[in-house]
Image (spheres, grey):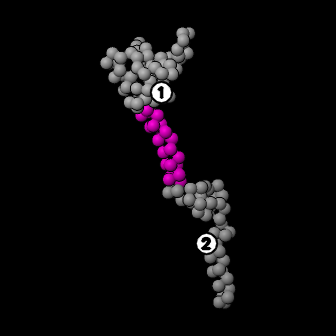
């Protein structure tokens, strides 16, 4: 084999390693060139794991934020029941950390007010007031 032939073979191998012939896309996490199967989406296992972890972590953070808000609301309503309070201004509750948008149940009653629930505690609400706070007894 002559010198020029071996140089051209070596140059061909370098082209393959540099990604021109075998590359078929970019990693959806880091943007690196992908080699191998045409249906690959990630350049490495670590990129795949990091992508999936971040995707799940985002929904986990949202769920934890909602669960935390519901727990705060429940503890506040429960402490009001223990103290014998059945009615309170909503602004007072909100100042203490109550978040009225976080509920576990809603029921439209035949009366004037809609009924909300936070787990087993039910209450009615107007724009300015939370009232008729009571614990629902389940059988």
Image-quadrant location for residue 94: top left
Instruction: Classify 10 Å Cα crowding around label 1: few (below 14), some (14-19), many (20 and above).
Output: some
- Image: magenta residue range: 48-70
Which of the 4 image quarters holds residue 135?
Answer: top left
Which residue position holds label 2? 17
Secondary structure of the residue carrying tag 1 is loop
The residue at the far left in this view is 83
Q: Is 125 situated above or below 99?
A: above
In the rendered structure, the answer to whether residue 77 lies left or right of residue 58 reads: left
In percent of width and height, residue 24 lies at 66, 62
Residue 108 on image: x %, y %: 55, 15
Element marked by disc 2 = helix
Task: Provide residue 128's location: percent of width, then percent of height.
Answer: 48, 21
Residue identifier under label 1 = 100
Any part of residue 110 in sight:
yes
Mark 1–mark 2 CB contact (< 8 Å): no
Q: CA distance from mark 1 to mark 2?
A: 60 Å
Q: Residues within 10 Å of mark 2 (few under 14, many from 20)?
A: few
Q: Nearer the viewer, residue 89 or 80?
A: 89
Question: What's the residue at 31%, 18% (across, down)?
Answer: 83
Mark on residue 30? Answer: none
Q: Quadrant of the C terminus?
A: top left
How far across and down, in percent of the image, does residue 11 sit?
A: 65, 80
Q: Nearer the viewer, residue 120 or 50?
A: 120
Is residue 124 on the magenta stretch? no
Main secondary structure along the magenta-highlighted residues: helix
Q: Residue at x 33, y 15 (%)?
A: 84
Identity of the residue furthest to the top in this view: 110
Instruction: Tell me which residue sits at (67%, 70%) in the image.
Output: 20
């Amino acid at each position: 084999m002559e010198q020029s032939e071996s140089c051209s073979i070596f140059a061909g191998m370098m082209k393959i390693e540099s990604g021109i012939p075998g590359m078929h896309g970019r990693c959806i996490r880091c943007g690196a060139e992908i080699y191998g199967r045409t249906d690959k989406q990630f350049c490495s296992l670590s990129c795949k794991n990091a992508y999936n972890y971040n995707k799940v972590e985002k929904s986990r953070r949202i769920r934890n934020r909602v669960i935390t808000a519901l727990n705060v609301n429940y503890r506040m309503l429960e402490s009001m029941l223990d103290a014998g309070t059945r009615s309170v201004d909503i602004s007072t509750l909100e100042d203490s950390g109550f978040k009225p948008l976080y509920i576990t149940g809603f029921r439209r009653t035949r009366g004037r007010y809609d009924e909300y629930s936070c787990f087993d505690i039910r209450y009615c609400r107007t724009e300015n007031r939370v009232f008729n706070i009571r614990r629902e007894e389940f059988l």
